[in-house]
Image: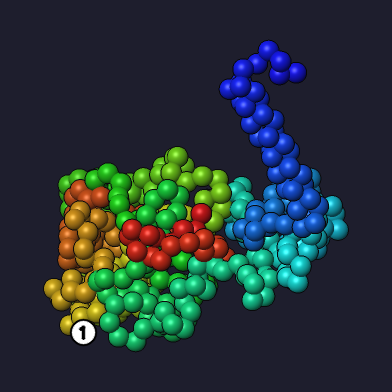
Amino acid sequence: MFKNLNEMQKKLVKYIIIGVVIIIILFLVLFIVKLVNGNKLSFDKIEDKMVKAADKYYKDNPHLLPVGDVSSIELRVDTLVEKDYMKSLDKYTEKGISCSGKVIVLKNGSYYAFIPKLNCGGDYTSNSLVKKITSKGNIVTKGDGLYQIGNQYIYKGEKINNYVSFANKIWRILRITEDGNIRMIQDDYFQQQDWDNRYNADKKTTSGINNFEVSRIKDDLERIYNGELFSATNKAKIVPTRLCIGKRKSDDKNMDGSTECATLTEKFLPLGLLQMNEYLIASLDDGCTDLNKRQCTNYNFLANYDRNYWTITADATNTSDVYYIDYSPQSLSARTSAVIKLVINVSGEINYIKGNGTLENPYIID
């Protein structure tokens, strides 16, 4: 067949044929390996398959979704296997690895999220961010870090690795709440604006009224939540709460939140602002005993922002003033301008993906 070809052309044809043969052999080897090993998947791929199966299951059975405005249920992988939504877990793992699993279904209003929980013993176990950061080795009793105070875990100090990536923004963890959720403050901010700008009859001027329930800033938080910042899945992971809106005097020495939480919002709300006691308790300086003490700015990560930002706490001594953070706390007219730094609670069920909590490598949970 090579009679009319010169020597160079003959060699080229030969190499092409050899190349084709090698490719065929490689495909055969890969096919045989697949037959021997089956459809083995990495653990994260198995978790993805669990989520997709759960999503399909509930699309077919919407009446089985959790009820109530804010709720959650568990769906066992065994149920998904029995109903033919996925294969048994041993079909996806290497020989000798035994796994069990479930999917946590979170509901917030009309929003749903599916959180996989895979348990393969010592080989792999899904780990929530709460469990990761509250492990015994991460709790401190002095210096910067995470402190256990009663049934909560609170970050205190200045140089702490509590950065989280969520909803395409960077946040800083304030604390793990008593009910096991993650309370975080936005690291950047929204535009500068008034807390409230209405006419105050007591002051006989448009100095604003420091009642959060009817404030302009409450409307702004609602507008942000209904905007494009949070996806439907993000919203499902946010846990609405009755916000603590009790007013505070500057010499109040209470730091446990009982002053602020003496009054709660009528409704459960998804977005809030920093409580004044949360600023105080973040400082490691023993001289930080009330809002009048400049020592509260020492060893306090919440004092290190370069923009003045609003808190949710109003001044109890009048009807127009609200606290904002200008390095140190200030009580000023609600008509004053400051930026919004959102505070949210997200479900403690959310899995840790990667990261070490630094600004350069924040914890990834979405």
Relative height, residue 230 to residue 155 (above, below): above
The answer to whether residue 86 is seen in the rendering is: no
Measured as percent of width and height from the top left, residue 107 is found at 62, 55
**Left or right position of 194 against 345:** left
Q: Residue at x 50, y 67 (%)?
A: 129
Measured as percent of width and height from the top left, residue 359 is found at 33, 60
**Left or right position of 295 against 149:** left
Q: Residues within 10 Å of mark 1 (few under 14, many from 20)?
A: few
Measured as percent of width and height from the top left, residue 79 is found at 81, 60
Amino acid type, mark 1 = Asp
Q: Which residue is mark 1?
A: 286
The answer to whether residue 46 is seen in the rendering is: yes
Judge by depth and name the residue closer to the eye, 337 or 86: 86
Q: Residue at x 52, y 50 (%)?
A: 234
**Residue 4, located in which quarter of the rendered image?**
top right
Relative height, residue 290 to residue 55 (above, below): below
Measured as percent of width and height from the top left, residue 46 is found at 68, 57
**Residue 1, located in which quarter of the rendered image?**
top right
